[in-house]
Amino acid sequence: MAIISKKEAILQLGIDEKTFDNYFRIGGEVPCLPRIGNGRFKFDDKVLNNWKLDREYRTVILDIADYKRCLDFALAQDARAYVASDFGSGRQREFGQKITNWVKGQLGEIAVKKFFKEKFGTDVELDFEIRDSIVPQDITAINEKGKARTPRIGVGIKSSKPKSVYLVLGSNEIELPERRSDVYIFCRPDLPDDHLLRLTRDAVLSFVKGEAYYETYKNEIPVLTPMPCEIVGYCEFDKLEPATEIPGQKFESGHRYVIKTGLLKHSPVDWRKLIGRL
C-alpha cells in the first residue's frame, strides 16, 4: 500500500480534476482515507486501483448501430409531437435537447442489456415501443432457454451526463404506485453534446463551404465514434429521499427523489443478486 495525494490520485485514475471532485466530494464514489483534522485528503493507491478496475468492469462500449437505434426512437418520439419539459421546470425543451435526452436515455438501456449479457450471460428485452402512455418498466422480459418470461420485479433505467453524481427522479415516479419501479439503475453514457453535428458533419461542411469562416472550423468537427457508458449502480426505490435541491441545482417545481452515486450498489456480487431477483 502507498499513500498518495489528491493530485497523484487524479493521475492514477486518469480523469480530469472537475470530474474527480464530483465523484469524490459530491458523489462520494472515490474511496478516501480518514482525514485527520484539517489535513489534506490522502488516498490508498491499491484501493483506488480497485475502484478504477471496478468502474472499467461496469463500462460497456456502445457502437454506431446502438446510437442509430436510439436516434430512430428519439426522432419517432419527436414526430408524434411528444411534449418534453426541462427536468424540474415547466419549460419546453428545444429540439436538440429533446433528441439528446431521448437518445441518452435509450443508450443507457442498451448499455444495461449489453452489461447483463456480457458479464452475467443474462439476456433481457427492452421497451423500445412508441406508446401513448408512460410505461415505467424498462426491462420487459427475460429470455431463458429460448423463451421470454416477465421479470419478477420492475426495473427503471435512468441516464445522465458523465459528471452527474445524483440519480434524480420526479415525485410522480416514486409516489404513484403505477409509475414506480422496484429498482432503479443509473447510467452515464458519454454521448457528445454535438452528436447531431458529428453525424451530419459532411453535409454541414458541404453546405457552408466557401463562407467567410469556413477555413477556421472545417477540420475541427470530429466524426461520431463508438462511446463508453458506465453502469454506475442501482438502488431500491425506497432508498431514494425527497429533496428540493442537490448541489448545483435547485428544483423549480416541488421536490424530487434523489440518491448520490456513492450510495448505489455496484459490485459484481450486487449485480448477481439483482439479476437473481429478475
Image (cartoon, rainbow, N blue to C red):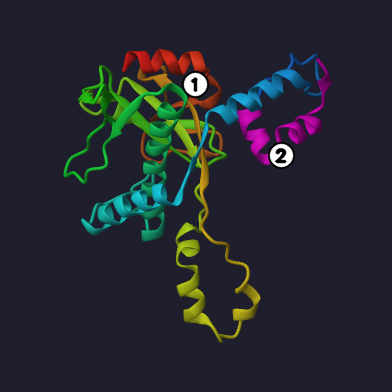
Q: How busy is the neighbourhood of tag 2: few (under 14 within 10 Å), some, or many (20 plus)?
A: some
- Residue 238 placed where, x, y %? 37, 16
| 8, 250: nearer the viewer | 8
Label whose residue precedes the other's in the sequence (1 or 2)? 2
Residue 29 appearing in the image: no
Q: Which residue is mark 1?
A: 264
Whole-percent x, y for residue 52 in the image:
65, 27
Name the main secondary structure of what is drawn in magenta: helix
Q: Circle 2 sits on which residue?
A: 17
* Highlighted range, magenta: 1-29
Q: CA distance from mark 1 to mark 2?
A: 22 Å
Q: Position of residue 165 (x, y in %)?
A: 54, 32
For disc 1, the neighbor class at 10 Å (few under 14, some 14 to 19, many from 20) is many
What residue do we see at 70% from left, 23% from top? 48
Q: Is residue 19 magenta?
A: yes
For residue 119, above or below residue 192:
above
Left or right, 221 with respect to 16, comes to: left
Considering the numbered disc 2 on the image, is that residue within a helix, a strand or a loop? Answer: helix
Residue type pointed to by label 1: Leu
Q: Kindly state the secondary structure of the residue where label 1 is placed.
A: loop
Q: Is residue 78 left or right of residue 261?
A: left
Q: Is residue 16 visible?
A: yes
